[in-house]
Image (spheres, helix red, strand yellow):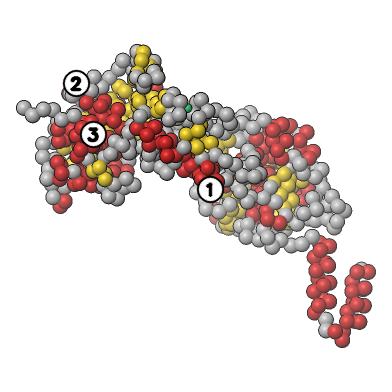
Amino acid sequence: MPREQKAVDWIPANIKIPAETETPGPFDLDLFPHVRGVLEALDDTDVRNIILPWAARNAKTTTGISALIYFAVCKPRPSIFASSNQDRTDDDINSKIYPMLESCAKTRDMLLPKHRRNKNFIYLRDSRIRRAFSGSPSTLAGFPACYFHASEISKWTKNKSSEANAIRLIGQRAKLYPFDRKGIYESTPGLKGECNIMALYRKATTQRRVRMVPCPHCGEYQKLVFGGKDEDGPGIKWKKGKNGRSDPILAEESAWYQCVNGCKIENFQRAEMMRAGLWVPEGMSVNEWGELIGEPKVRAKDVGFGPLSSLYSLVISGWGQIAREYLEALDDTEALRDFINSTLAEEWDPRPQTIEPHILAKRMCHGTSAGLLPDWSRFLTAGVDVQENGQRFVYVVSAWGEGGRGQEIKHGEAANFDNVVQHVLRRQWQFVDQGEPLHITQAFVDSGDQSELIYDLTRGLNGVLPVKGSGNKMETMYREAVLAPEKRRNRLASEEIKLIHINTTQSNEWLQRHFEGRRFKDEAEFLLSVDSRLDIDFLDQLLNEQKVREFDKNNRLQTRWVRINTSLPNDYRDALRYSRVAAIYCTNDGQLWNALPPRPEDARKQQQAARRSAMGASESFEARNFDDDFSAR
Ligand SMILES: [Zn+2]
């Protein structure tokens, strides 16, 4: 009987990573040194399940597939490859598994010709790999399998009835093979509290192993961390610009890693450092000679390796690549979530950092006194929210200027809509510098669940439109719609209504960015009136909304904005949002931010100058007279 082939020898010697990937060529343990420990665990008869919460660029899927191929050749038994959904599973099979099987000399001839291949199985000479995916319990049930690779399990279905099922089902396939069974679960982490891979990793019966690498200067073995919060602590560091700000390009060029003892670890030292790394079970440590000492806290058949961030990857260009990706992701919640999950291999906590009202006041209440327009104001908008069956109206008036800058001018409540019209929408608003006053150009009134009432109240009012929040995927900040009489709740209605749909997500994101002090690079500032700093109720309402993410029935991640404290209102927040969207509406989806009408007195001067230049030289006398007349009026 031939000597048994070990995975740790066979895989690097036989597996080729296909040409279409980032790292084509042999499965090189010098390029992915952290994989060696996993291959050794495949050879360890005491290990049953392997759990890999790994970032991208660490070859976790390639490692799992390589294990299936190794077993198919060296210990043929039925196996399963499963991912989160059908498309992803098929894509992995067609773009990874088949190309790897075809480029491996040992398996190439075991495959069926392309036209005879079956969608549900990959047939090899002595075994087969079954295709399954989490959304389809039937693909995961009713047959035995000795080996399985469960890929990207944090994206596996969260449907309550089948939630635990998909993951449990695949584990149960191996019951008939108590001694030989081997399962690999891998994934980048997902949402905090719902993350399948971290739940397996944290189980009391999992032996957790952490990747420790030695500092090339002082030799101390340590876990790599991104750092950031503690300026002096370990982590990736980079030079900042003259203004003390971080710049992605400068950060990429200048980054280094600071060891726990303060040593400066450069990019050229990374490869050697990673290759000298060790997987250290919880409860054990590394002595100065690089030997494991102590006893593992858990002795178990399930072993978790990680979490392993992309800091350990030798496929990245260096520390600077991570620094740059971080800085470029900061502006965008989605990108930041991806950075946390896929690069740092950490769970994403969707709960925003709650902001205290006094912090918001300090950050934003630097505007003019309530009711007075800053000198840069060019036009005004208002947002009105309706409460208590039309018994109470909450409004916010905002001023807007060149480039999109803005300020909340005034907020308040009124007991009826007439008061809002008389004292807010139709009044003149004075400038702080005594210039000619402005009127409100556009007001948006939430029609919410009082739609017919609001249609009635706003009908015929120039510059006043009913609006509705829209949670649907809208590309733009607003959408104009015309509501036909037959679509109205009022069956007797005979006229159509112009209605504005407001993008709830985008308008909330805009507010939240300003509240959290993380505006886009060139985004204009928005302020609150200086008097608002004393109005805690107003500030509380502005802050009383947060974004939550949840999976819908189709396992798609959805975003919703909900009140943080459901017993407190957030009407001012809504009204402020509507005033913002009204400004975007007035500027034709933001296209006119640099072509706003001048202030009234400037407009007059411009008219005069235009008239003057339009007059011929011979008429200049007459023109002067005309000017005198005009200015005397
Ligand atoms: Zn050091």
Q: Disc 3 designates what residue?
A: 67
For the point 36% across and 15% down, the residue is 293
Residue 591 numbered tag: none
Rendered position, 409 above or below 215: below
Rendering coords of residue 362 (x, y %): 73, 35
Q: Is residue 73 visible?
A: yes
Rendering coords of residue 533 (x, y %): 76, 35
Marks 1, 2: nearer the viewer: 1
Return the residue nearer the eye: 504 or 287. Answer: 287
Mark 2 lies on a secondary structure that is: loop
Question: Is ligand 1 within 8 Å of the beta carbon of the residue shown at mark 1?
Answer: no
Mark 1 lies on a secondary structure that is: helix
Q: Disc 1 designates what residue?
A: 249
Lower sequence index among marks 1 and 3: 3
> Which quarter shows the C terminus?
bottom right
For the point 76% across and 38% down, the residue is 532
Marks 1, 3: nearer the viewer: 1
**From mark 1 to mark 3, how far is it between C-alphas?**
39 Å
Marks 2, 3: nearer the viewer: 3
